[in-house]
Amino acid sequence: MRLRTILLASGIVFMILSGIFLVSCGKKPMDGMIIITEADNRAVSPDFVSGKLWRYIPESHLYAIDPENTQKAPESLTGNFFSACSPDISFDGKCMLFAAQKSKDEPWQIWEMDLSSRKVAQITTGNENSIDPAYLPGGQLVFSRTIANDSLKSGHSLFTCNTDGSNLKRITFNPHSYFASSVLKDGRVITIGRQIFPEEKTAAMMVLRPDGTKAELFRQNIDGMEFFSRGRETADGKIIFIESGKNTGNGRRLASISYNRPLHSLTNLTAGITGDFSSVFPIDTGKYLVTYRLSESENYSLFNFDAESKKLGDQLFKSSDKSIIEAVIVREHQKPRKLPSEVDKGVKTGLLFCQNIAVTGLSSPENVDSLVADRIELIGVDSLLGVVKVERDGSFYLKVNADMPFKIRTLDADGNTLNGPGSWIWLRPNERRGCTGCHEDQEMVPANRVALATKNLPVAVPVHISGIKEKQVELE
Amino acid sequence: MKKILLVTGIIFALGIIIFIPGKRMAREHVNLKTAVTDHPLLCTNCHLHMHKRSPFARFDQADYLSPLNLAVSNDGKLVYIAAQDGNALLVADVEKGKVIRKIPVGNKPHSVIVDKAGKNAYVSNQWSDNVFVINLDNYQITDTLLTGNGPAGLSLSSDEKSLYVVNSYSSDLTVIDLESGIEIKRLTTGNNPTGATLSPDGSDLYVTSRRADIAQYGEPLVSQLTVVNDKSKRIKTYLGMESAYLMENVAFTPAGDLAVVTLIRPKNMVPSIQVERGFMMTHGIGIIEQKENGRIIQLLTDEPNAYYPDPFDIVISPDGKRAFISNSGVNTITVVDIDSVKALIAESTPEMLKLWPDHLGISSRYVIKRISTGANPKGLALSPDGQTLYVAEHLEDRIAVISADNMETVKTIDLDGPGRITVTRKGRRLLNNAGRTFQTQYSCYTCHPDEHEDGLVYNMASKDMGRNITNTQSLRDISDTPPFKWNGKNQTVFKQDGMRFSTVLTRTEPFPYPDLDAISSYIMTGIKYPPNLGFNPAGKLTEAQRRGKTVFERTKDNLGNVIPENNRCITCHPSPYYTNLKQVDVKTLAASDDSILFDTPHLNNIYASPPYLHDGRASTLEEIWTIYGKEDKHGLVGDMTKNQLNDLIEYLKSLRSPDYDGKSTQIHEAALNH
């Protein structure tokens, strides 16, 4: 009798444990599902500077749909929120980041949802808006956040933190706004950046390491075009995105650039298609999920898209009264490289090296003529930082306060401006950055020669930082 | 029963008592060796794979073939393959897709060529200093032709009466009269030559060189192409390829209007502060116009965010339309459209032609395809009709068969090597692959070709960007010479290739620990010195070397005064590796160096590692003392006569690996007995 009881109890325990095991290790509950952002189709122009009606979508909501059974009612995922958008799926396909506001008057925050239990956890806090989250390898994320009264005059800066909200770090330090980031397979963050001070400029696609170092131009917008969606990297080495502008002719179009040569590989994938696109997400090589509408009077719906034939495929899902403005697929996907960081907060400066200031555009490095700068002037947000003499081979080598934006203007021997000022630059603590030239062709590499500037110690800018006792960091 | 329980309990308790501190000690030991705190505590990771004399090491060995170069029979039915580690010439039947003959040859065969009649194959045995002549009717070795040191590339003269042999270690070219089998000339080439190709009209032989001319850091980098007149068998000219090195091979267009070499354009003089924007290495081709006052033009085959390192071989299709280049570091064949190259050159101003060698985007004009291959593609050969490209997948033990028209792999020929991949083999693949460098800009091999060193001095940008320039060190047989790095700051290879390595060099995610274990295993156990056949072929010193040994080991100067122990050669450089494994100050710090001690370098095969001293300031061994050691702080030499110094240098050049056991002779004899 006792044995029978023991056996029975053991059997029950085994069955319960087996059930738990099967639930936890079997097919992920949402694997293969598509998560969409639904919102009103507002016939107003988005504000690319503030992000309103572009990255901030009021009363938006996330839903899960089953691509195998699109007749089934979508599952609401964010019913408890006033607005929720910008979903990003973790590399193991088990969790989702999104930006949301609990109520109309609360700031936007970053949240993470366990896609098995649908439980959500708030990652960011505070009174500032946090939007556009994207997973980084190593249990971190990158997102955009506003800073009230920022001395750097930035709009939305990029931040990283752990998925539990700890280890919050700002990684951009210039008067720009950054939106719609995602992470490239090489581990860098790709983001849409726009100068907002002292005047607004056209947005550009920028890349930087997750520690904020080595920020550089990835894709310059041309002809007044605006990047409308996140750039997403495909398995075959493309970055796909939606861009819009007065010259598109057919509204917001789907375009791609090659990772290998982003500055000179723009392909319009929707040249023959009338209508607008609002988002794109890669499925397989050459196959994308897009949200599309035929005209402004219609709502955006979810479609397949074939990049090779450049044709819109089947309509996957259409909401009865709302627009589907973005979509992502829940699935395990390749984890990007986790890049090592050279940032050391014990160091207060960064080093900037330019090999030859005479290398500009497509000029020859040998073409050193009378227009070559004699000196450079560094300009801060609020003040001039200093003037530095350029070596006779065109090189200069600076030590600059870390996390401080500055621009460079080239001057002749009489102090007249030759070029610039250029774009805002910043250096992270202990960052060491190199440039081949000054506003040079971005595809140029440095010549293999010893630059005169590196034979001396770096010039400290502003001058008073030369007295800083730096922590010595052993490198190689 | 009680006793049993008691004993068991005591054993258990003792186990617990020993286990806890034992585990802590093991953790501390592993942390010390790896310089990280989270490396898995698995004894076998290190003790099974890191010691070359360990009895367990043989479990991690397999007889790989490692095809390096190849040639196709005149009827296109057979492929002859020089199997570098298999010490064999393999004959593969293309149609059957398998190896039909394995002919033992000398030590480390490098290249194979076939004469026009298809009767004979010539195989250069790089570690045996000879060339085997093999009758292709019966696969018998019919002659052994003696060469200079390290025979590599081969070419027949236009009349096929002479054989040119590129001596890669002695940096010269042997000309052999095939009728007598005797070397009739020895011509000086560029530094560390490898490839040799005769122009289509048979007038000139081009010989590539891998190492640049020895020059002081900061001087322009120039590597030499040697041009030999085939008729006179004399040097016609040397063509300097500026800012480039590692020119492995050369090919001509069938019309003979262009010669094209593979090359690397290093950035060793640019501070190594980033990988982005080509700050470390770029790779491409050099084009030599074959006309009066023909120009030398360099073009990159890289792209702005993607690099194609370690270009090795190049072949050009019979119609002259396409060049195929093997990029060993990324398992890729790059296909270049020759007409597009010509068009670009024709439309470019002289200013633009100066610009293109440093322009990553211009490759989109002429690179038309990247074809994936197996591990570490090296030698290439086209079928006589130009329809099929054969690729020696060096670390895959396989030949890829590619349709030259479609530029797709049609099939592969398995060479029947060991099926399994040992830990050290995995490590070798990793060392030869750029996959663990940001944007695949370079592999370990790039700066350590043949696991040696590239002869360059690098600005490693320590602290400030112009300080502490360093001479690349060889990876050969370093396992018994810790610590590592020029200042001895890395106690193990684990540390050398670990987190810091990824932060300051590769600048991407570090090696996962299984990969780090594998690459460390290969470096610690798998890299051998070539036999020092040039200066010490049989382990017996010459008269001058013996005199030099006496000088090396002396304890008194020429006046009979006792030399302080710390200023004797033998004190810091004792055999068998000629290092005492300690850090010392030999007063060779430069003004741009931090105040630091130097790790005493090992000296075996030191003849093959110019330039010398930590920053490469000494072009020759002599200069260490005649120019940079006048204060007698790096050994007492001030009293020596010129003859004594010469003898000392001769002795130093004779030093060779203690592990060298006459294997070369054994392999050679085995081949002849075949």
Image (tube, coloured by chain):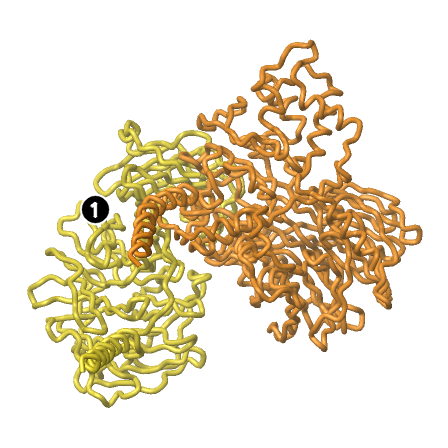
Numbered disc 1: secondary structure: loop
Which percent across, then down, holds residue B616?
58, 33
Q: Is residue B79 visible?
A: yes
* Residue topped by disc 1: A152
Q: In front here: B467 or A314?
A: B467
Q: Is residue A223 above or below residue B54?
A: below
Q: Residues within 10 Å of mark 1 (few under 14, many from 20)?
A: some
Q: In front here: A309 or B462?
A: B462
Q: Is residue A276 visible?
A: no
Q: In front here: A83 or B32?
A: B32
Q: Residue at x 90, y 50 (%)?
A: B181
**Quadrant where the image shows the C terminus of chain B:** bottom right
> Dividing the picture into quarters, in which one does residue B184 lie?
top right
Q: Is residue B565 above or below residue A255?
A: above
Q: Is residue A47 above or below residue B156?
A: below
Colour that chain B carries in the picture: orange
> Dividing the picture into quarters, in which one does residue A122 lie?
bottom left
Which percent across, then down, holds residue B242?
62, 44
Which percent across, then down, holds residue B261?
67, 54
Left or right of B150: which side holds A388?
left
Colour that chain A carries in the picture: yellow
**Quadrant where the image shows the N terminus of chain B:** bottom left
Q: Type of residue at label 1?
A: Leu
